[in-house]
Every structure is written in structure tokens, then in C-alpha cells.
Image: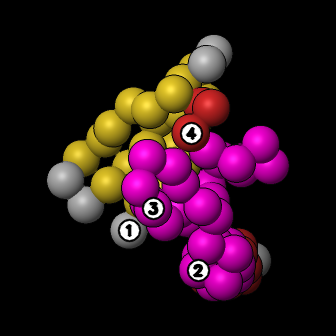
Amino acid sequence: MIIIDRFENETAVLETEDGTETVMRCYLPEYAKEGDVLIKEGCGYFVDHCATEERRKAAAERLRRLMSRND
């Protein structure tokens, strides 16, 4: 799985199964944002919208559970 960790000027730092990787931002879709799950195809990347949404929902649920435990 490849996830956008952050953007630094004209580069993107990606989290991969093997660690981190830096790529030029121009290889990503213009609408890509931090936290998006990517699929590599050829020299470019595409956002996996379904996997991204699943990760965001899971993170929101973890946060909700943590917040409810502190009440």
C-alpha cells in the first residue's frame, strides 16, 4: 500500500511497505492530498478512492472510540 504522508514544495513523501519514498508531485493527480492511498501505474500514480475512504472511516472510528473512553 502506498500512502501520501506529506508534501514538501514540489515533492511528495510517500509511505510504502518498504519505508518512505520521495517522488515529484507532478507524477500525482492534481487533486491528490495527504492521507490518500495510491496505486502506481507506469510512471504515475492514481488515487484509490475506495481504499482511501476505508482508511479515513477506520481512523475516524478509532478516534471516536478513544474519545468516548475518556469521558
The residue under the point 53% across, 62% down is 38
Q: Quadrant of the C terminus?
A: bottom right
Alpha carbons under labels 2 and 1: distance apart: 9 Å
Circle 3: residue type: Glu
The residue under the point 38% across, 68% down is 1
Q: Secondary structure at mark 4?
A: helix
Q: Relative to 7, say whether 54 is above or below.
A: below
Q: Nearer the viewer, mark 4 or mark 2?
A: 4
Q: Nearer the viewer, mark 1 or mark 3?
A: 3
56 within the magenta span: yes
Query: What residue is disc 4 on?
Result: 27
Where residue 17 appears, x then y in whole percent? 25, 61
Circle 1: residue type: Met
45 displayed left or right of 59: left
Q: Which mark is residue 1?
A: 1
Where residue 65 appears, x then y in whole percent? 65, 83
Circle 2: residue type: Ala
Alpha carbons under labels 4 and 2: distance apart: 20 Å
Q: Which mark is residue 51?
A: 2
Q: Are marks 2 and 1 in contact (CB under 8 Å)?
A: yes
The residue under the point 33% across, 38% down is 21
Magenta region: 28-57
27 within the magenta span: no
Query: What residue is disc 3 on?
Result: 41
Say which label, 4 or 2, has the lower sequence index. 4
Q: Secondary structure at mark 2?
A: helix
The residue under the point 51% across, 49% down is 44
Q: Are marks 3 and 2 in contact (CB under 8 Å)?
A: no
